[in-house]
Image: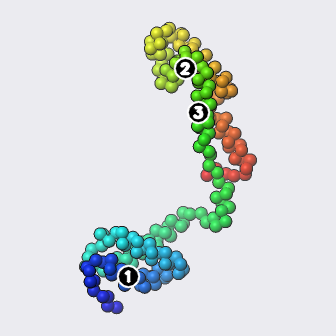
Amino acid sequence: MTLAPLVSGDPRDEMPVHLPALRAFAISLTRNVSEADDLVQDTIVKAWSNIDKFTVGTDLRAWMFTILRNTFFSHRRKRKREVADPDGIHAAGLFEKPEHDGRLAFNDFLGAFDQLSPEHREVLILVGANGYSCEEAAAMMGVAVGTVKSRTNRARAKLTALLGMAEGEDILSGDVGSTLAVMSRSGTQAA
């Protein structure tokens, strides 16, 4: 087959000449006309957008066949990793833990924290949030170390009571457990 010479020197002008051969090759690979047409379209888009990688003077048809072949096998590898779920049965059985649990717990914490006395908030910020030792916090607050330890203990106990938590309970553990319990009653599984 003799190809028409390039008039403009731009290899993109030659691409339409190769469409029938690309389509025939795609049909032989996919065994499906619709998939073959999609494959040819993907090939043209890739060739067009990467034309700067084509060496003028070499075989454009061979270059496009290589793109088509590589695209076909890339799609095939990708499909192997996908789960066929045409009816959505698998997807309907999955769930994801809601992200709002943490925000709700934090809002509860802020409400309870605001109810503490300024001295208790101060000691929890220094010792709990910033990680200062009782000795360092005592020096910053200008009080005895025993006072810091006592305030820290009382502030934690008061905060725990305001949040309605048991001793040693994690603020998110109850929410996570109740969320998972609701989701498990629905018969779904974690994603």
Q: Amino acid at mark 3?
A: Phe
Q: Say left or right for 55 vs 106.
A: left
The residue at 49%/78% (across/down) is: 37
Q: CA distance from mark 1 to mark 2?
A: 73 Å
Q: Position of residue 121 (x, y in %)?
A: 55, 20
Above or below, 116 relative to 189: above
Which label belongs to residue 121?
A: 2
> Considering only order in the chain, which callout, 2 or 3, is on the residue closer to the N terminus?
3
Residue visible at 67% across and 42% down in the picture: 179
| Residue depicted at x 29% and y 69% | 52
Find residue 106 and name its label: 3
Measuring from the top left, give residue 62's x and y in whole percent: 35, 79
Q: Amino acid at mark 1?
A: Pro
The answer, for residue 105, to whether it is visible in the render is yes
The correct choice, above or below, for 41 with respect to 80 in the image is: below
The x, y position of residue 104, in whole percent, is 62, 36
Residue 31 or 101: which is nearer the viewer?
A: 101
Which mark is drawn over residue 16? 1
| Circle 3 crowding by C-alpha within 10 Å: few under 14, some 14–19, many from 20 | some
